[in-house]
Amino acid sequence: MKKLIVAVLAVTAFAGSVFAADVIEMKKGVSFKHKAHIESVKECTKCHATAAGGKIDGFGKDMAHKKCRECHTEMKKGPTSCKGCHTK
């Protein structure tokens, strides 16, 4: 039974990354490269509540500025300045 549950979870996580959008256009000229983040971070729960993904509760300007910049700084990868994300 445990193996079945693990297999279902693995398939669900894989399916989520296969069907995820390549680029998500956000407000204020920010293009979020979702597939690039999947490949780089490899851990959906770093941003999402579950490995299945989905909407991020409470996501908005304040959360993006805090959480995204924090992660980019921690990983020493990705923009941390205003113009780095707000390209348009």
Image (cartoon, rainbow, N blue to C red):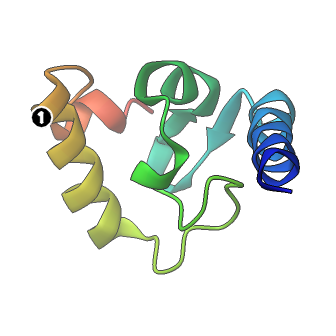
Q: Residue at x 28, y 71 (%)?
A: 62
Q: Residue at x 83, y 28 (%)?
A: 18
Q: In this view, does 22 lie to the left or right of 46?
A: right
Looking at the picture, tell me which residue is in the foreground, 6 or 42: 6
Residue 80 in view? no
Give the number of callouts.
1
Looking at the picture, tell me which residue is in the foreground, 62 or 14: 14
Residue type, numbered disc 1: Glu
Identify the residue under disc 1. Answer: 74
Mark 1 neighbour density, 10 Å: few (under 14) some (14–19) many (20 or more): few
Q: Residue at x 86, y 57 (%)?
A: 1
Q: Residue at x 26, y 56 (%)?
A: 67
> In the rendering, at what x and y percent does residue 9 appear?
77, 49
Q: In this view, does 78 lie to the left or right of 37?
A: left
Instruction: Determine whether 64 is above or below 6 in the image.
Output: below
Q: In this view, does 53 lie to the left or right of 75?
A: right
> In the rendering, at what x and y percent does residue 35 appear?
63, 25
- Look at the image and tell me in which quarter the C terminus lies: top left
> In the rendering, at what x and y percent does residue 20 appear?
77, 37
State the residue lying farthest toward the bottom.
Answer: 58
Instruction: Determine whether 76 is above or below 24 in the image.
Output: above
Quarter of the image where one finds residue 53: bottom right
Instruction: Determine whether 18 is above or below 5 in the image.
Output: above
Q: Is mark 1 on a helix, strand or loop?
A: helix
Quarter of the image where one finds residue 52: bottom right
Residue 82 in view? yes
